Amino acid sequence: MPESSENAKRSSTGEDTTELKRGEDLFHALLEAAPDAMVIVNDSGTIALVNAQTEKLFGYHRSELIGQSVEILIPEKFRGGHVAHRIKFGREPRARAMGENLQLSARRNDGTEFSVEISLSPILTGDGFLVASSIRDVTARRRMEKLSTFGQLAGSIGHELRNPLGVIESSLFILRKNLGDPDVVNKHIERIGLQLQHANDMVTKLLDMIRDKPLVRTSVRLSQLIGSAASLIEWPAGVTFVQSGLEELPAIAGDEGQLRQVLVNLFENAIHAAEPKGEVKVTGAVEGPEVLVIVEDTGPGVDPNVRHQLFEPLVTTKAKGIGLGLALVKRVLERHGGSISYEPGTRGGARFIARLLAQPSF
């Protein structure tokens, strides 16, 4: 080979190497300059790169993270489900927010948990498939949102409590003037009792929303839980209860008591919609790592004007509803790493879809 050709080849190779080095330096500089924690993992979930913000946010030195499974940054109770989600993302990689519509948590080196938002971006390299995760601590924002919600709730509950208190006041006024008439006395004592129960239910549900009662997780068979929840309800004679595909559902790791209340709330809403004559159907299904429980009724469906705010506190479609039932359902499911959604039913009624993560099998 002529010397000039050999020199040109060496020059070209040197330029390529220099250009590659510049690209790598630029990439690392951008990674370090990012305002959020950046964690880059390979297709097996092993951490390949992190930036300084990751060290600061999670309390690790990068040497303690690189080469570790990314699940080290996730609360232990969510790790099994995260593996399944990670595998699913690898099959259909696209830039998106992780756990859309869910409240996500991360775990620091000292074991403390905090609220985060995470964005995922797939990267295809010559060495294989990588995922870049941008992680932002949103603890302060979540706290402010919670305080704002509670403030709105307190104001609204105060307004709502005036109704039963007003009825009680008027009944007491009538009772004072008619103590010698047993029919009037019995009527208004019963009326007062109903209004007190209504007020008590309202306060109880509000406290349930505020307290964030700790989850006591056990292995839960949904088919048994659904049967247990249904048995707590007095079913009207004209409403039939149909079950389908429940026995095949895998177990989940959850708080049995809180999840039972979720089902009771969904069933009671469906019964109210289906009355006086109709059907409530609960169906089970599995989609990837998620277990679906679908509650459908043959009622009139939900007014399109309120569908977008169905799961907000104090929104109700019932004449005597409090408007906290579906908000509680959403809160409990999200604390389990799940979600709830609404869509029109196949027979014109309402269809609520609860999603939970299947219990990991090891």
Image: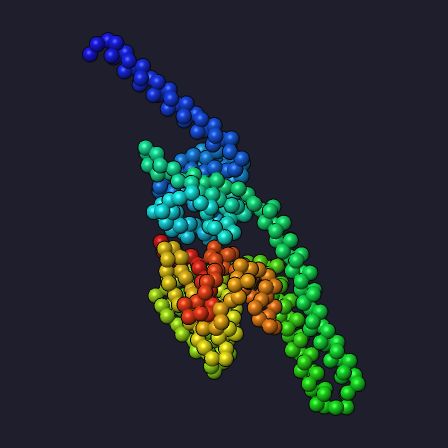
The image shows residue 322 at horizontal and vertical percentages of 61, 68
Residue at the extreme left: 1
User: Which color mode does the image show?
Assistant: rainbow
**Image position of 216 (left or right of 361):** right
Residue most extreme to the right? 177
Left or right: residue 177 compared with residue 98: right
The reply to whether residue 255 is visible in this rendering is: yes
Q: Position of residue 138 (x, y in %)?
A: 56, 45
| Residue 258 visible at all | no
The image quarter in which residue 121 lies: top left
Residue 107 x %, y %: 50, 45
Q: Residue at x 35, y 34 (%)?
A: 125
Q: Quadrant of the C terminus?
A: bottom left
Relative to 179, is 243 on the left or the right? left
Name the foreground residue: 244 vs 62: 244
**Where is residue 119 shown, x and y percent of the image?**
47, 43
What residue is rendered at 60% in x and 46% in y? 140
Q: Residue at x 37, y 19 (%)?
A: 18
Q: Quadrant of the N terminus?
A: top left
Q: Residue at x 69, y 71 (%)?
A: 163
Q: Residue 63's quadrant in the figure?
A: top left
Number of numbered discs visible in the structure rendering? 0
Which residue is situated farthest in the top direction here?
A: 3
In this picture, is 116 found above or below 188? Answer: above
